[in-house]
Image: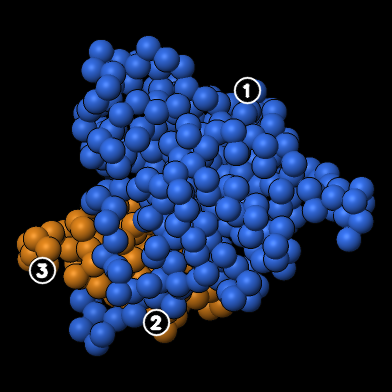
């Protein structure tokens, strides 16, 4: 993240990180998680699942901040995120 | 990241996973509302053994069949009477009615207004998809004026119910409206409704891409975009001033919360134990 000066509390601020898990066989390909991920982590994969839908895939898994929105908006209980080790703000990747 | 190590969804404990994937169409919002309800049920900290879910008939009515709690899939329109009986027989239960607009407000409309009038201690979650989804997308009591459905190909000549106003006029003591996109607010509202006493009514707008969406040329994501762009959160507004118009705006928020004696309290006071 770029700052015009380094904030005084940079050392204390940590950004949560998450790992997205996708249960592909439950996915019906509605695309809500892809459209509404605030960090743009997901995209539709070219693969088919066993029902003929394209499940999402994490194209930029490092951007996930474990907000759980994909988990909340998914109508099919097919995606969730779990917490990963937090990261200092200074090394957080810029979108 | 495709979860190769037998992934387990956090809500699997509250789901009858052998019945998942559910029957709801791709892009249907009921699953999201259902998910928010389950998150709310688990976040109240109450014993799940003392929570019961009652559904009527329709797409949303399938909810009772997917929840791994005591649940009851009732006859059409009669979810509230069954829930009322359950609550009166066992006052310790937290009873949630999860059903659709057609079940609760068309065939079950009278049951709704009388349960609200009596202030029965129930939480009623109404998934409003603006049409009768399961039977083929016919016009319902909530279909907007001029909207096309399979029974109104030239546009709906009727006016829809204003559900928050109907609930308020009938005597509901907690009234909120959200869309399935506002999952956080929705979950918080359901949690509040579950932890308070009195008749709580939460209307949730959800897209029906197969029924309403196809006739009105709205894909599921178009409907969500409307929710995002037209939503106006106005907490505490008079329910008479709320609007639900996909072109001009959708009023969301927690509109009403007040306390008055429930049916059980009044019954005890008048008729004794």
Q: Is B90 located above or below residue B48 in the figure?
A: above
Separation (CA) of disc 1 from disc 2: 45 Å
Q: Where residue B184 appears, x then y in whole percent?
A: 52, 55
Say which chain tag 3 marks.
A
Foreground residue, A28 or B158? B158
Q: Where residue B261 appears, x then y in whole percent?
A: 84, 47
Q: Nearer the viewer, mark 2 or mark 3?
A: 3
Q: Nearer the viewer, mark 1 or mark 3?
A: 3
Residue picked out by circle 1: B241
Residue picked out by circle 3: A50
Q: Secondary structure at mark 2?
A: strand
Q: Is B26 located above or below residue A68 in the figure?
A: above
Q: What is the quadrant of the N terminus of chain B in the image?
A: bottom left
Foreground residue, A7 or B166? B166
Q: Are marks 2 and 3 on the same chain?
A: yes
Residue B111 in sight in this render: yes
Task: Spot the orange chain and give its letter.
Answer: A
Q: Are marks 1 and 2 on the same chain?
A: no
Separation (CA) of disc 2 from disc 3: 29 Å
Separation (CA) of disc 1 from disc 3: 48 Å
* Residue plotted at (66% across, 47% down): B200
Q: Where residue B149 appears, x then y in whole percent?
A: 28, 25
Are there few (<14), some (14-19), or many (20+) residues within 10 Å of tag 3?
few
Q: What is the quadrant of the C terminus of chain B in the image?
A: bottom right
Q: Secondary structure at mark 3?
A: loop
Are there few (<14), some (14-19), or many (20+) residues within 10 Å of tag 2?
some
Left or right of B149, for residue A46: left
Residue picked out by circle 2: A84
Please name the color used to draw chain B. Answer: blue
Q: Are marks 1 and 3 in contact (CB under 8 Å)?
A: no
Going from N to C along the chain, the mark reached first, 2 or 3, is 3
């Amino acid at each position: 993240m770029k700052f015009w000066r380094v904030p005084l509390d940079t050392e204390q601020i940590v950004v949560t990180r998450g790992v997205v898990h996708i249960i592909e066989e439950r996915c019906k390909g509605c695309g809500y998680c892809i459209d509404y991920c605030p960090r743009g982590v997901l995209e539709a994969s070219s693969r088919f699942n066993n029902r003929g839908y394209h499940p999402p895939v994490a194209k930029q898994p490092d951007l996930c901040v474990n907000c759980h929105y994909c988990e909340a908006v998914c109508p099919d209980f097919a995606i969730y995120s779990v917490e990963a080790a937090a990261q200092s703000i200074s090394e957080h990747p810029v979108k | 990241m495709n979860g190769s190590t037998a992934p387990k969804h956090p809500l699997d404990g509250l789901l009858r996973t052998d019945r998942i994937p559910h029957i709801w169409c791709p892009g249907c919002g009921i699953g999201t509302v259902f998910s928010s309800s389950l998150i709310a049920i688990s976040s109240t900290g109450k014993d799940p053994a003392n929570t019961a879910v009652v559904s009527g008939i329709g797409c949303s009515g399938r909810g009772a069949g997917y929840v791994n709690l005591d649940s009851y899939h009732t006859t059409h329109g009669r979810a509230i009477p069954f829930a009322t009986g359950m609550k009166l027989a066992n006052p310790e239960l937290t009873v949630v009615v999860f059903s659709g607009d057609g079940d609760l407000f068309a065939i079950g409309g009278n049951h709704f207004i009388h349960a609200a009038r009596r202030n029965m201690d129930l939480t009623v979650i109404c998934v409003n998809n603006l049409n009768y989804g399961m039977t083929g997308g016919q016009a319902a009591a909530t279909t907007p004026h001029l909207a096309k459905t399979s029974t109104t190909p030239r546009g709906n000549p009727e006016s829809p119910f204003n559900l928050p106003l109907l609930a308020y006029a009938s005597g509901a003591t907690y009234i909120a409206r959200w869309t399935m996109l506002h999952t956080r607010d929705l979950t918080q509202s359901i949690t509040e409704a579950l932890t308070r006493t009195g008749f709580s009514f939460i209307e949730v707008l959800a897209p029906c891409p197969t029924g309403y969406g196809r006739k009105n040329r709205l894909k599921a994501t178009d409907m969500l975009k409307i929710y995002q762009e037209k939503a106006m959160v106005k907490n505490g507004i008079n329910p008479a001033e709320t609007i639900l118009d996909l072109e001009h705006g959708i009023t969301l928020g927690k509109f009403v919360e007040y306390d008055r004696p429930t049916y059980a309290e009044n019954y005890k006071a008048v008729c004794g134990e």
